[in-house]
Image: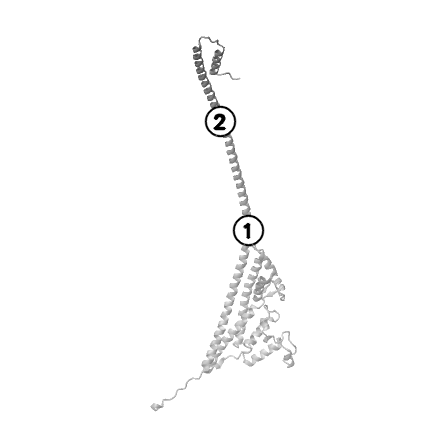
């Protein structure tokens, strides 16, 4: 138990003396002075006690409330609480940061995997691309073979049109007529020909040398007579019989030279016309082996199945495959954007290639038109009457 302080003991002692001491009967005034002094002393003592108690209370309260050195003070407890709350906040912020970092890391990895998958899909070789590339290579090979075929046929037809040595009209137009009739009877004999005795039996392709179907009836000419029939149709269409050439002593006269000049002009026009027909024939000549994809496209289109195909057939199959082929259209639906762009680029390249081929054909058409204009103008100036000079009678002449 805490012992009483000094002022409190003095106050208690004074009070005891005042109560216990006997008071004289004749000392009333003295007793009042003593009482007043005792009261003052007691007040002072009380004030000191109260002041001491207040100081102690203030010190105790200050120590209990604001003294940070006191571990049990309110300030210390609140400071610890605030510090703890701050630590909690720091820990929460740190945890959120770690969660955000983990989420960002995971999302970055996820996005990278998506990007890798897109790159893989965009650079993955598509089977349709391989099929298209095979077709393009076959197309170029067929074009090269067609050019060789044009050159080979043109050499023969030009010599025939000029009635060169070894050709049917070398010795005259009569020989050319006989050779043409013999060829027709051996390859294209019809029932009418049999009836008049030109040939003994009907051919498998009667009158094919005069039917446009022989040249334009199919994209690939058959190797069993189809190429010959197309070429013979072009011969019948352009120059069935070549006239005899002007040679020898005929060239020594002025008239012979004029006829030779006209014959060379004739030969040039016939060569141009035959070249156009030969060019068309070469585009339909079978010269490239079809692959499995092209064979399947033939079957799906209901066309006759062939092993060797022409340039025109290959181009037709490639165009039709991208228009109506179910497999290609289904594959197109699942193509990534990069693959679709490659398909578009391939088709643009094919369009440019076809535009070039059309340009070459237009050059031939322009040459034919120029030839026709030249012929018309030549005929006009030849048949135009020349003005006759009249004598001037005024001067007696």
Viewer-proximal residue, 108 or 116?
Answer: 108
Marker count (numbered): 2
User: From the viewer's perspective, is the residue at label 2 or at label 1 nearer?
Assistant: 2
How far across and down, in percent of the image, does residue 143 sit?
54, 65
Distance between the alpha carbons at the discs numbered 2 and 1? 68 Å
Please tell me which residue is depicted at 54% across the width and 71% down the height of the picture: 278
- Tell me how the rendering is colored: one colour
Q: Position of residue 314 (x, y in %)?
A: 57, 64
Q: Disc 2 marks which residue?
A: 65
Q: Residues within 10 Å of mark 2 (few under 14, many from 20)?
A: some
Q: Would you identify the image quadrant in which residue 160 lies?
A: bottom right
Q: Disc 2 vs disc 1: Cβ atoms closer than 8 Å? A: no
Quadrant that contains the C terminus: bottom left
Query: Can you say whether 263 is above or below 130 in the image?
Result: below
Which residue is more in the foreground, 347 or 259?
347
Q: Residue at position x 49%, y 72% from top?
A: 367
Q: Residue furthest bottom?
A: 396
Measuring from the top left, give residue 88's x and y in whole percent.
Answer: 52, 34
In terms of image quadrants, where is residue 131? Answer: bottom right
Label 1 residue SS: helix
On screen, residue 298 above or below 245: above
Q: Where does label 1 land, which residue? A: 118
Secondary element at tag 2: helix
The numbered mark, 2 or 1, whose residue comes first in the sequence reads: 2
Q: Nearer the viewer, residue 299 or 102?
A: 102
* Residue nearer the viewer, 243 or 135: 135
Residue 57 seen in the figure: yes
| Residue 370 x %, y % | 47, 74
> Dot 1 surroundings within 10 Å: few (below 14), some, or many (20 or more)?
some
| Res. 232 mark | none
Q: Is residue 257 visible?
A: no
């Amino acid at each position: 138990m805490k012992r009483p302080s000094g002022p409190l003991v003095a106050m208690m002692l004074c009070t005891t003396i005042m109560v216990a001491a006997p008071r004289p009967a004749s000392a009333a005034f003295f007793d009042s002075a003593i009482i007043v002094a005792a009261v003052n002393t007691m007040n002072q003592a009380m004030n000191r006690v109260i002041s001491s108690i207040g100081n102690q209370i203030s010190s105790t309260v200050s120590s209990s409330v604001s003294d940070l050195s006191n571990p049990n003070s309110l300030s210390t407890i609140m400071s610890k609480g605030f510090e703890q709350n701050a630590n909690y906040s720091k820990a929460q912020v740190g945890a959120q940061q770690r969660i955000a970092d983990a989420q960002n890391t995971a999302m970055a990895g996820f996005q990278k995997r998506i990007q890798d998958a897109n790159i893989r899909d965009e650079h993955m070789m598509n089977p349709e691309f391989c099929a298209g590339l095979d077709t393009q290579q076959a197309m170029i090979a067929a074009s090269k073979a067609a050019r060789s075929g044009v050159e080979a046929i043109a050499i023969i037809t030009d010599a025939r049109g000029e009635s060169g040595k070894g050709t049917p009209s070398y010795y005259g137009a009569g020989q050319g007529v006989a050779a043409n009739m013999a060829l027709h009877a051996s390859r294209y004999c019809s029932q009418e020909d049999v009836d008049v005795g030109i040939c003994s039996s009907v051919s498998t392709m009667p009158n094919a040398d005069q039917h446009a179907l022989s040249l334009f009836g199919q994209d690939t000419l058959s190797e069993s007579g189809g190429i010959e029939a197309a070429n013979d149709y072009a011969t019948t269409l352009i120059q069935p019989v070549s006239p005899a050439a002007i040679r020898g002593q005929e060239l020594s006269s002025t008239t012979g030279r004029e006829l030779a000049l006209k014959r060379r002009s004739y030969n040039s026009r016939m060569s141009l016309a035959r070249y156009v027909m030969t060019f068309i024939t070469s585009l339909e000549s079978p010269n490239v082996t079809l692959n499995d994809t092209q064979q399947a496209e033939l079957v799906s289109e209901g066309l006759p199945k062939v092993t060797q195909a022409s340039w025109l057939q290959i181009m037709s199959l490639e165009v039709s495959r991208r228009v109506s082929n179910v497999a290609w259209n289904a594959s197109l639906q699942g193509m990534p954007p990069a693959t679709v762009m490659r398909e578009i680029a391939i088709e643009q390249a094919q369009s440019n290639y076809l535009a070039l081929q059309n340009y070459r054909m237009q050059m031939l058409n322009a040459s034919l038109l120029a030839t026709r204009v030249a012929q018309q103008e030549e005929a006009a100036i030849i048949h135009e009457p020349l003005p006759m000079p009249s004598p001037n009678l005024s001067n007696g002449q």
